[in-house]
Amino acid sequence: MKNHMHVCNVSSDDEKIIISDESSRVISSIEPYCWWRSAAEYDEYVKLKFEGGLPDVSRLTPRIRVFKELERLALVASGTTAGTHEFHSHYSDGVNELRHKLLTYRSGDFWMPTGGISKDNMDIPPVATILLVGFSASGKSSLVNLMYSVLGRSGLVPFAQTSSSSGSGRTKLLKEHNVVRSLHSGFCVYDSRGFDYNEIGETSVGEELSSWMSYGIHQNQKCLRSGDLDDVPHHDFVGDDMHDDFPTMSKYNWSSNFVRRTVNCVMVVANMAEIYKAFKAGDTKLIEAARQLFCSSAFQNCDDEKPILILTHGDMLSTEERIEARLKICGCVGVSETTGVYDIVCLTEYGFLAEESDPISAYALAEAVYRALLISDRTHLPKKTHQDWALLVLSWIVCFIASLFALIAEICFKLGGRGRQRDHSRLLMK
């Protein structure tokens, strides 16, 4: 049985791949998710791929490396078997395999025995936490909806959950999502409030990010910014996140009784179309703000574990523009164009989730979550031993004694100063 692949350009922005089987004369079509194959440099990539032997690494330009990465995702996502061109446009083996791994995942499953410490001596939380950060209207809520559809499916019934009822990045609360819909899920995803491009350089943004990374986050935690108090009814602050005399408590439930999660991995979500169009118009503010957010000192606790970059699409871009935008953004934020970055279409041009029309985006999303869990299990620290607690208590005691002696010295100094002042006054009177 012999198969032929024909590529027909439907428009300048997309394409459709037709696979015909000569023996059965059956023609099946795949939706236009292999958009990169219409690029001018794609023929060069194919030539390098089939030259035989290993290609010269020096000839792999950044664009060619992007093609190589996209072809890898297409190969796995579409379920292509070796030596054939059999495509499964729905529920491919690649997505199903990752979905099963994520469904059965427990926090610490991807832990590696490094440092000579056993797993029982590691401080592994019951739930790994992935935090989504980005700018307003960058696609965080749509990304959560796509996670529900890709990872939380039950049979053939898609399930989407809107992550923000306020819309347009106006949510003032952190929202926790268990996207695999399992009581035994080992991870959760937090949707945060989007930042403004103009305020990313302010100190308050860095302090908020550092607070999330250092002290953890919890469900319905407030994300107030400057100017928000005018929109919130008058109330009294009590404790950390508790509020009294608040008439709309059901809408702004800021209770701190929820379990506080330690952030194990961060996904920086950026609207690729918005940033690229501003860059082409000569406005570099958006791409510089994306660089500052990605390279924030709050995420630099471990140099080897940088945030995962998710590039979403708010508008349709041509093939050349999508590749150029990916290279520009990756080059600016300082991440490899093929490692730790995923180009995901959350919504199609018709407003539907992209899983059915773009299985590569579905697989890329599942792989991004899988990568985040791998990073999470590498960031766990050893448990504190009795010796560690003893040293900690001893340091507290020493600090208390030092503070007490400093207070006594200050009091004695002030009393001695008053005595010297009285003696000086008496000498002057004589």
Image (cartoon, helix red, strand yellow):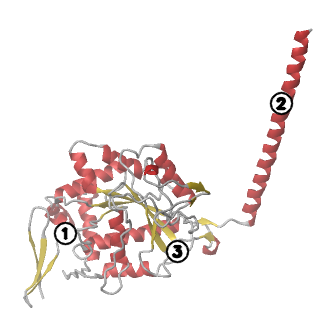
Amino acid on which disc 1 is placed: Tyr
- What residue do we see at 51% from left, 76% from top? 109
What is the quadrant of residue 67 in the picture? bottom left
Residue topped by disc 3: 107
- What residue do we see at 17% from left, 71% from top? 32
Residue topped by disc 1: 350
User: Left or right of 359: which side holds 411?
Assistant: right
The spot of residue 252 in percent (x, y) is 48, 62
Q: Do the numbered discs 2 and 1 sit on residues whose CB atoms are within 8 Å?
A: no
Q: How many marks?
A: 3
Observer-side mark, 3 or 1, equals 1
- What residue do we see at 34% from left, 45% from top? 288
Q: Residues within 10 Å of mark 2 (few under 14, many from 20)?
A: few
The spot of residue 128 in percent (x, y) is 51, 70
Residue 413 bears which disc, if any? Answer: 2
What is the quadrant of residue 369 in the picture? bottom left
